[in-house]
Amino acid sequence: MQKVDPLLIDDLLGEAHPDAHCELDFGSALELLVATVLSAQCTDKRVNLTTPELFARYPHAVDYAGADRAELEDLIRPTGFFRNKTQSLMGIGSALVERFDGEVPGALEELVSLPGVGRKTANVVLGNAFGVPGITVDTHVGRVARRLGWTTQTDPVKVEQEIMALFPPERWTTLCHRLIFHGRRICFARKPACETCPLAPYCPSYPTGEPPKARAPRKAAAGTRAKAGRTATAATNPKARSSKAPSSTRAGTTPSSTRAGTTPSSTRAGTTPSSTKPPGPARASEG
Ligand code: SF4
């Protein structure tokens, strides 16, 4: 299998999940911050069942700061870990009142200074409430990125940095929504639905979901590739690749997205996926 420009993969993800979006319900930066805190170890669906009453009862940061702990615990109990989450929400409310005039700040450094707020939560808020691009590395984003060969890292900050190097900032927030949708609907943790995955012809983890083995450090190459734009590259072991290639590729047929007549937008824009090009070692440039 040949390596394919990550931008093409993002285009394919966009076609597979055209409605990818933040699945937490919110109407303000504060509501998104609260919902994101509640979403830890909990489904977005359950959070969305819990937050209408919560948001009505606690509309402002000052309400969390002065909350009755027992009442707040009761309200958010269905989301799990409710004592810790109550502590976080009350701490966030107090910090917002004391340091930010009760408003949610729109900068990463300020957001992560709030109690219980890490980079993941901060990037969710920045990307979806403030329109500030960011890579949110949750379990789905990390897993799918590793399976696609974009990173071998498991540390979320390193994964974030390596994905950032592959894409222009204007793609970051939407890309994360698409990866999360893909991880929740197709690229499952235990049994990924590789046979129905539109990325299969390009995925180095097809057909088992087992990511490629850790290779030499790729940071420099990744950065170079991002700067170079949509140049597709060839992989280094065509023999191994051919044994893992999805059925459509093994049979010499065109990938499903092309078969279906849904040419990826990057192809439409003039970038041919490397897997559709004739083999040629001269194109190999990326480790
Ligand atoms: S081919 Fe399989 S491992 Fe690769 S992205 Fe699709 S579902 Fe995930």
Image (cartoon, rainbow, N blue to C red):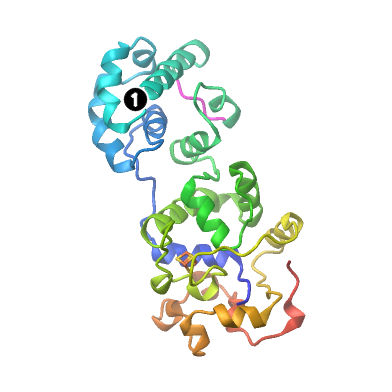
Of residue 143 and residue 208, the one placed in the foreground of this image is 208
Looking at the figure, which quarter contains the C terminus? bottom right
Which residue lies at the image location 71% right of the left edge and 85% below the top edge? 280
Q: How many numbered discs, if any?
A: 1
Looking at the figure, which quarter contains the N terminus? bottom right
Coordinates of residue 251 in the picture (x, y in percent)? 49, 90
Horizontally, residue 280 falls left or right of residue 12, namely right
Q: Quadrant of residue 97?
A: top left
Q: Is residue 55 visible?
A: no
Coordinates of residue 233 in the picture (x, y in percent)? 68, 73
Read off the residue under disc 1: 82
Q: Is residue 125 visible?
A: yes
Instruction: Say what amino acid the circle numbered 1 marks.
Output: Phe
Which residue lies at the image location 62% right of the left edge and 41% below the top edge? 157
Which residue lies at the image location 46% right of the left edge and 51% below the top edge? 140
Disc 1 on helix, strand or loop?
helix
- Vertical side of 176 occupied by 259: above or below: below
Q: Is residue 106 magenta?
A: yes
Coordinates of residue 247 in the picture (x, y in percent)? 47, 83
- Vertical side of 63 occupied by 266: above or below: below
Of residue 100 and residue 181, the one placed in the foreground of this image is 181
Specify the segment rendered in magenta.
103-107
- Vertical side of 179 occupied by 85: above or below: above
Which residue lies at the image location 29% right of the left edge and 18% below the top edge? 72
